[in-house]
Amino acid sequence: MQNKSRENSENNFIGLLNFIADPAVIVDAKGRILLVNNALEDITGLNAKEVIGKIFLEVGILTVESKAILLENLKKRMQCLPIQPYEITFSGKDGEIRYFEVKAKKISYNR
């Protein structure tokens, strides 16, 4: 019964996550992508199967500068340091350059 309850809770969580209009990505302390919402595919053209399990530095759409910014801020988040929203640049699968504001916090997420 407990597994069914956990499964229902996880399905509800994923359902809510997919209602968010902006891409949402959960990464672990090493930057490995654990979960993404549907908006990620809408904005980038990448689907969940293409990114889950990869370290965000391996995802080919990010610019070198954006990878450096994301990595530096991940380190700060893991130290529970406050981080102001910041902008990254990426190219969608269609090759178009896009900008995105990142607002991130350290959370506990066990899947």
Image: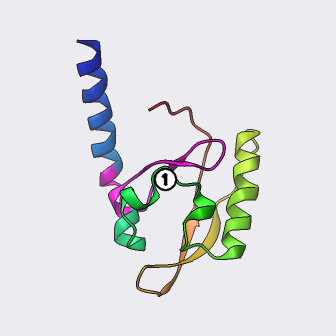
Name the outermost residue toward the top.
1
Query: What is the quadrant of residue 14 in the picture?
Result: top left
* Left or right: 107 as drawn, with respect to 10: right
Figure quadrant of residue 105: top right
Magenta stretch: give its range. Answer: 18-39
Give the quarter of the figure containing the C terminus: top left
Which residue type does callout 1 highlight?
Val
Q: In this view, does 99 lie above or below 3?
A: below
Q: Is residue 91 left or right of residue 74?
A: left
The residue lying at 58 percent from left, 61 percent from top is 102
The image quadrant of residue 100 is: bottom right
Would residue 36 appear left or right of 60 to someone viewing this image? left
Q: How crowded is mark 1: few (under 14 residues within 10 Å), some or many (20 or more)?
A: some
For the N terminus, which image quadrant? top left
Residue 64: x %, y % from top left: 70, 75
Residue behind mark 1: 25
Q: From the viewer's side, name the closer residue of 20 and 54.
A: 54
Q: What element carries label 1?
A: strand
Does the segment drawn in magenta span residue 38?
A: yes
User: What residue lies at 53% left-to-right and 54% top-to-bottom?
Assistant: 54
